Amino acid sequence: MPPPDLQVPGPTPISTIGAGAVAPLQATSAGLTFLGRGITPLTRRRLDNFRANKRGFWSLWIFLVLFGVTLFAEFIANDRPLLIRFDGGYYMPVFHNYPETEFGGVFPSEADYTDPEVRKMIEAKGWILWPPIPYRYDTITNAPGPFPSAPASDDWLGTDDQGRDVLARLIYGFRISVLFGLALTISSSLIGVAAGAAQGYFGGLVDLGFQRFIEVWSGLPVLYLLIILASLVQPNFWWLLGLMLLFSWTSLVDVVRAEFLRARNFDYVRAARALGLPNWLIILRHVLPNATVATITFMPFVLNASITTLTSLDFLGFGLPPGSPSLGELLAQGKANLQAPWLGITSFAVLAIMLSLLTFVGEAVRDAFDPRKAFG
Amino acid sequence: MSLLEIRDLHVTFAGWRGAAPVHAVKGVSFALDKGETLALVGESGSGKSVTALSILQLLAYPAASHGPESSIKFAGEELVGAANARLREIRGNRIGMVFQEPMTSLNPLHTVEKQVAETLSIHNHLPAATVRARTLDLLHLVGLREAESRLSAYPHQLSGGQRQRVMIAMAIANEPDILIADEPTTALDVTIQAQILELMHELRDRLGMALLLITHDLSIVRKMADTVCVMSHGEIVEAATSAELFARPQHPYTKRLLAAEPKGRPQAPPAGAPVLVVAKAVKVWFPVRSGLLRRVRSYVKAVDGVSLALREGTTLGIVGESGSGKTTLGLALLRLNEAEGDIRFAGREISGEKQKRLRALRREMQIVFQDPYSSLSPRLSIAQIVGEGLRVHHLARSEDEARRRIDEVLVEVGLDPDAAERYPHEFSGGQRQRVAIARALVLKPRFVVLDEPTSALDATVQAQIVELLRELQQRHGLAYLFISHDLKVVRALAHEILVMKDGQIVESGSADAILNAPQHPYTKALMTAAFDLAAVTAQ
């Protein structure tokens, strides 16, 4: 992980060549908008800087498209049809459960749309619209065994060792990885910023005590603890999020604390105190904006780290419950089934692409907030 | 043929990402002879430093470029576009340079000896012993006291004046033909400034150098320079001998510059005005801790038992050099730092008051800081900055009223109300300082601490701000605590003066008495240094 540039613009430096120091009034805030909102010229410049990093800019778009698509995984890879026309009526099995009797079957249980009998019944009186991939992450495909079976026209990336479609699992796995990463990043940033802010702003004993606590806390062997805890409870998404949050919030504390220590002696913070602003307002309006730059610069890398941690836990078998679509589990299957290279290659490629995209985005964000560029 | 001849020098900086290029220097010509002192004078942004850096070709090429007609001839040799190897032979050897900020122009990781010896050994291959002896000679020459023991000192162990002496030692190490001094004393206290100027004058005569002095301070020019070139917007608008220029300035810009010295005296204070601020025996001591148990070993006495009284509508000037505790005292009076002693504001004891209960009182006591670049939050618009206090103290009943009051106060400090929607970086230093004053003024305070509000500004702007402050005081009956090291500005504003040294008051009284008949030797030294730029050795 490349070290993000922690230099943060304080007050605008006086232009070294001097010519800019005399009333440069040409840039007004009027007319600058982004997504319909008025923005400051500084933000404008940062956006331009971000865009100027072509690799990061395109990475962001590719990532957003991938993430956007996988968000609707149920509509892309599912063993239920999107839409059924049957006997003059429309049915949407994606949203509702229908008993088989609805389509003239005999069982009062939920219709199994993969059953050829059920299909025949429906198609006799209407039609079925399937998603592009007719498997969910836990659907056993019809691929001829033995599993894992090689890529074929039905299973584009083959199946895993339990006969589930790899592509369907990838789509769900990507979604859960990114959502987990985002949730962990956002919650650990919130806690980390709050903790760093309190330490930096109040300083003194608060700072001293907190710092020692964090040192001890971050000395704990995280992976072992997670493994022990995972044996006590059956981890699910939220359990894992909570457990990992216990240890990941410390990553931002140092940066934010340093920014606050620096900023609390700025003249404009002093001026705010002289104006009689209460502490929370000073923190929120005058000091926090300084720390946001460092935080935002860090975030893509924290996201990357979160995804990697989840993947490695899944790989070791201490992660999400068995059967969940997960990239780590697929990776473990690839390792266990070297005769089926499509498993290893696919999971490696997806992880590599996802993490690279995020790193490129992170680099572009760092560029965007680079004071040397932002203030050119 | 002159030693240094600059003809039609142009400097253009390429614009950043499509921005228009900046033409910083536009056809500057001058000549400098051996033993002569030439001063380049101008305000910030006039291109004087860029001109100086061009001589040694130290600009950031290729972002910076000289036009084809530009020529810098040093002893007949063209320097524009000269080979790097040749330029390195000249830099630090034939032409030495002293920079403005002694804090940042010395390498913090090298000792004094290493820094000075480096310049010596790069240009001459001397045995180590000779280099050491010569380094010591140089340090003696620039008047660094206890030079032997200072050899192994690091820059942070030296004071500003001592650092500047080391810088000068480095610049003259190889007995250059020309010494370029770029605002050599701007970062220094007045008494130190006088010493450094005297030193440079003396060295010029002793070594027969030519001195190119870059400054914005006309009193330095008057004292030091033989010839003066006045620069404005990248051009030399007037060049004359020093005597000629000060006697008969030709160009309107020169005239304006000469007229820019803060003039006038404050209005007579209203008779019988009530006392607003009283402080008795104010102490701000910072503990020095050491050892395993962090025991308090001693104290840094930043402010040590200062008493003062300030009447409504008057100005109390606090004068002293850096480190004398002026600013700490100002902050202590506003309870912005921890202080002991008795402080009363408008008859109310505030020294023991909790910060929470002080907040309501903050409306009536305000502060304007020295550096307008750091005292305004770069992320807030002017309207937000000025309006913040209104909101916190619920002084405006509606958004419209707040807006109206912001506009009013902006007009009052001489800014266009249209400025409200802009951000600080779009304004010049003087304009920013007006915004900072507006931020304090919008609350209609009774007491304002002005912490060197003019010292980061150009001379002409400085005079305007002094004028503005005087006007505002008269209109609103404000009480000012005016902190400054610049006696000229203090003279223009203060009714009473308090001279501080090492946290204590050495002299206090009415401004007239102190300025005309200083009693204490320190005050006397300060006066001579400030008004005559002469160093008083008997301190």
Image (cartoon, coloured by chain):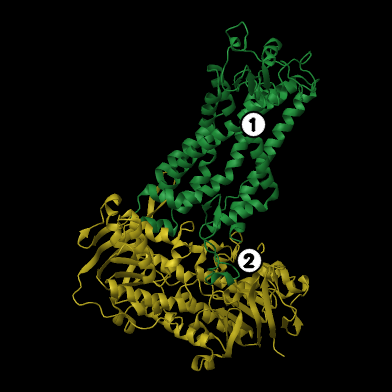
Badge number at residue A280: none
Chain letter for green? A
Badge number at residue A70: 1
Specify the amino acid type for callout 2: Gln
Q: In the rendered image, which quarter contains the C terminus of chain B?
A: bottom left
Could you give the CA–CA distance between mark 2 and mark 1, rounded to whole angstroms? 62 Å
Q: In the rendered image, which quarter contains the N terminus of chain B?
A: bottom right
Q: Tell me the residue at 43%/59% (across/down).
A: A267
Q: Colour of chain B?
A: yellow
Q: B108 or B408: nearer the eye?
A: B408
Question: Element under label 2?
Answer: helix
Residue B37 visible to the viewer: yes
Q: Position of residue A371 (x, y in %)?
A: 58, 56
Q: Tell me the residue at 65%/33% (across/down).
A: A69
Q: A97 or B518: nearer the eye?
A: A97
- Circle 2 crowding by C-alpha within 10 Å: few under 14, some 14–19, many from 20: many
Instruction: Write down the quadrant of residue B242 in the picture.
Output: bottom right
